[in-house]
Amino acid sequence: MNAVLANNVIRKFGQSLLGELITPTDEGYDMGRRVWNGLIDRYPAMIAYCSDVDDVIKSVDFALTHGLLTAVRGGGHNVAGNAVCDNGIVIDLSRMKRIEVNAASLIARAQAGLTWGEFDRVTQTFGLATTGGIISRTGIAGLTLGGGIGWLMRKFGVTCDNLLSAEIITAGGRLMTASAVENPDLFWGLRGGGGNFGIVTEFEYRLHQVGPVLAGTLYYPAARVRDILRFYRDYITVIPNELTTMFVYMAAPMTQSLNRLHFDGPVAAIHVCYVGPLEGGVKVLKPLRDFGPPLEDTVKIMPYVELQSMLDSGAPPGLCNFWKSSYLNSFSDEAIDVFAGYSESITSPLSQVHLQHLKGAVRSVGEDDMAFSHRDALCVLNIVTKWENPLQAEKHIQWTRDFEGAMRPFSSGGVYVNFLGDEGEDRVKAAYGSVKYGKLIALKNTYDPTNFFRLNQNIKPRGAGSL
Ligand SMILES: Cc1cc2nc3c(=O)[nH]c(=O)nc-3n(C[C@H](O)[C@H](O)[C@H](O)COP(=O)(O)OP(=O)(O)OC[C@H]3O[C@@H](n4cnc5c(N)ncnc54)[C@H](O)[C@@H]3O)c2cc1C
C-alpha cells in the first residue's frame, strides 16, 4: 500500500462510492482478492466494488491522484491474474450487471460486470444470443475486449465482431463512447486490444436468433488419438459454418457415465455445437458418429444456455492453472504425432489440451478492420494445465512449456491474446503482428500515454512520461 495514504483518506473515498470499498481488514477481503486461477495470490490495498459509472470515474480519479497501481476486474477469469494486484487498487465491476435487450432491433446493452451465463440467460428469454465464451462464469468484459471465441463464432463471428459500441472511462477519468461513428480509432483498438485503453462500463452487442442447438460431446478412446486427429483434420474442411467444433484430449473424462463404466483413463473428445435447422445438423454430425464408434455420444438438442454451461465442471475456480497457446494454420501428420506424444505424457488428471477450430464467419471480417488478429488461422491450440497442489507446479509447468516448444514449428507464430499468461512483450506483439502492434502503440499514446492501465496484456506507450 502507498505508505502515505492515511486511513481517513481511504475512508472518505469509500464513503463517496455508491458501491463498497473493501480493505484488508474487512470481511470479504480474502474472497474479493481471489481470481479464477488459484496460482495467483495477490494482496491489493483496496477493492472498489463499483455500482455505477460515477463510481468507476471516482475510482480512476482516486488511483490517479494517489499514484496507485490499478487492476480492473470483470469476471476475474484471465489466467495471467491481471484482475488483481499487490498493494494497489482493484476497480471491480462485478456488481454492475444491468442488461437491456431490444428484441425488435436485436441489440443488447450490457454492463461490464456480467458473466456469459448471466448475459445468455437474459438474451435467451427472447430467443437471442451473441457469440460468448464456452464457460458460463467467464466475464463478458475481458473476453469481448480480447476478441471472444465461442460456439457461435463460425456462424456469427467472434464476440468483438458483434460489438456495436462501448462506454469507456479513459485514463483521464473521462467518459467516452466508442463506435463506428464516435471515436472510431478507439473502437478499432477496443475490439481485440484488451483493457489497454480504459475501463468499459457498458457494451452494446448485436444479437442473433438462436433457438435450441444440437450439441454435446463425442468421446473416443485416447489410444486412437492419432487416427481421430487425422480424421478431424479432414472433417473440419468440409463442415458448414453452422457447426463449431473443438477437439480435446482429456486426462480423465468429464462424463459420469464413462466413469461408471470404470473408464477413468484419458479420452479424446470432440465437442460440437450446430446452430441451424436440426435435420441438417444430424446429417453433418453423422461422420463423427460413424467414425469409431464413440465410447459415448452425449449430443442432443439442448437449450443454448445448457450448452453454455456444459463444460463448466471442467473449469472450476481455484485450481492452479498454467496455459500455453498458439494459432495453427495447418495440422500435418508430424504435428499430430507431436501433439499425441505430449498428450499421452500429460502430468495431471485435471489437464486438457484444446484445439478450437476457427474459420467460417471468423474470416468474414477483414484482418485490418479491428485489433483482433489472425483471422486466417485454422485453429487455436491451448494447453490447459491444471493441478491442485501448488507445490507440484514445477513438473506441470515444465510439461506445458515442453509441449508448447515442441509444437512451435507448426504454429503460425500468432497467439490469441485472451489465452496469454504473463509471457512478455514479444508474445503480446505476436497477438497482433508488428504492423497492428504499431497502430496499437499509437492508440495507447493517444488514450493512455502514461500507461495508467498497465495490468493487462500491455501495449506500452512510447513517449515521455510513460511508465
Ligand atoms: C475457464 C475459462 C474459460 C475461458 N473460455 C474462453 C472462451 O470460450 N473464449 C474466449 O475467447 N476466451 C475464453 N477464456 C479467456 C477469457 O476470454 C479471458 O480470460 C478474459 O480475460 C476473461 O474476462 P474476465 O472479464 O472474466 O476477466 P478479468 O480477469 O476480470 O479481466 C481480464 C482483463 O481484462 C481487462 N478488463 C476486464 N474488465 C474490463 C473492463 N470493464 N474494462 C476494461 N478492461 C477490462 C483487464 O485488463 C483485465 O485484467 C476463458 C478463460 C477461462 C479462465
Image (cartoon, grey):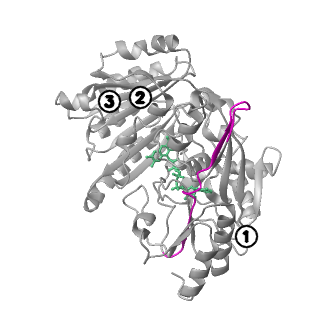
Find residue 12 and name its label.
none
- Please name the amino acid that badge 1 sits on: Gly
The answer to whether one can see residue 195 in this image is yes
The kind of residue tagged 2 is His
How far from the left and from the top, in percent, is residue 252? Answer: 26, 37
Looking at the rendered image, the disc whose residue lies closer to the viewer, 2 or 1, is 2
Q: In terms of secondary structure, where does tag 2 sit?
A: strand
Q: Is residue 244 above or below residue 454?
A: above
Q: Which mark is residue 268?
A: 3
List x then y, in percent, for residue 165.
73, 46
Q: Which residues are magenta?
A: 87-108
Location of the C terminus by quadrant is: bottom right
Left or right of 348 on screen, residue 359: right
Residue 463 is labelled as 1
Task: Report which quarter residue 454 is drawn in.
Answer: bottom right
Residue 149 visible in this rendered orientation of the protein: no
Q: Helix or strand or loop: what does disc 1 sit on?
A: loop
